[in-house]
Amino acid sequence: MELREKILAAAARVYAEAGFRGATTRRIASEAGVNEVTLFRQFGSKSALIGEAIGLAGGGDEPSALPDEPRNPESELRAWAGAHLRMLRERRSLIRKCMGEFEEHPEMMPPCGTPPAVAADALCEYLDQLRARGLAGAEFDSRNAATMLMGALFADAMGRDLMPDLYRGKPEQGLADYIRLFLRAIGVSPA
């Protein structure tokens, strides 16, 4: 692993665990196995380092693509949503820290074009294709529908461990239910 990547990975881990204040340059340097001076030579400031680390840790390719031509909406959306949900769960500690510290450190928020924004765009295109092919019969706005499904996935990823009474069933069953209810809402007939 390249030095810069090693430092960024360490910064993301420390930030996800300790937040901005707890993610001291000394602690990040120790986690990365470098001295503090190296951090400042590479990134200039703690804010720049953590901002880039968050962007890198929250980045990456969308884990699963939706097909250009829908054939089986239930299985296609379930695979896509399952991959998106796994990605959210893997990054939930980092996401929670970012959300909790946004007001104090707005510079820590990733720019536009983040994986969730890219995923939302892909989902909107897929929903438009469902409608164009006559597979979705309800009247709906694609962006609002995508936001609804992604909101359910986000809430599950962030809340399942915090509110076990609300999320009683197994995660796989929750995902299946979200997709089934979503498809019913947009007017897709069951397979």
Image (cartoon, rainbow, N blue to C red):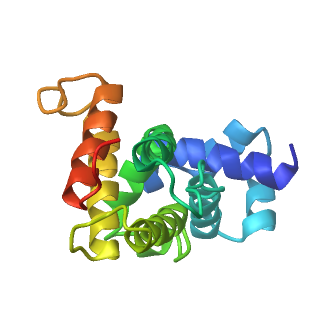
Q: Is residue 129 above or below residue 76?
A: below
Residue at the far right in the pictured view: 2
Q: Position of residue 153 (x, y in %)?
A: 33, 48
Q: Position of residue 79 (x, y in %)?
A: 50, 41
As rendered, which of 149 and 101 lies closer to the eye? 149
Q: Position of residue 124 (x, y in %)?
A: 43, 70
Residue at the location (65% across, 56% down)?
61
Residue 109 seen in this snapshot:
no
Q: Position of residue 51 (x, y in %)?
A: 57, 66
As rendered, which of 7 and 113 lies closer to the eye? 113
Q: Which quadrant of the rendered structure holds the N terminus?
A: top right
Residue at the far left in the pictured view: 165
Q: Is residue 110 above or below residue 95?
A: below
Quarter of the rendering containing residue 18: top left
As rendered, which of 120 and 15 lies closer to the eye? 120
As rendered, which of 79 and 67 lies closer to the eye? 67
Residue at the location (56% across, 74% down)?
113
Residue at the location (56% across, 62% down)?
69
Q: Is residue 70 left or right of 176 when viewed as pictured?
A: right
Q: Which quadrant of the rendered structure holds the C terminus?
A: top left
Residue 157 seen in this snapshot:
yes
How many dots with numbers?
A: 0
Q: Is residue 101 left or right of 29 when viewed as pictured?
A: left
Q: Is residue 38 above or below residue 153?
A: below
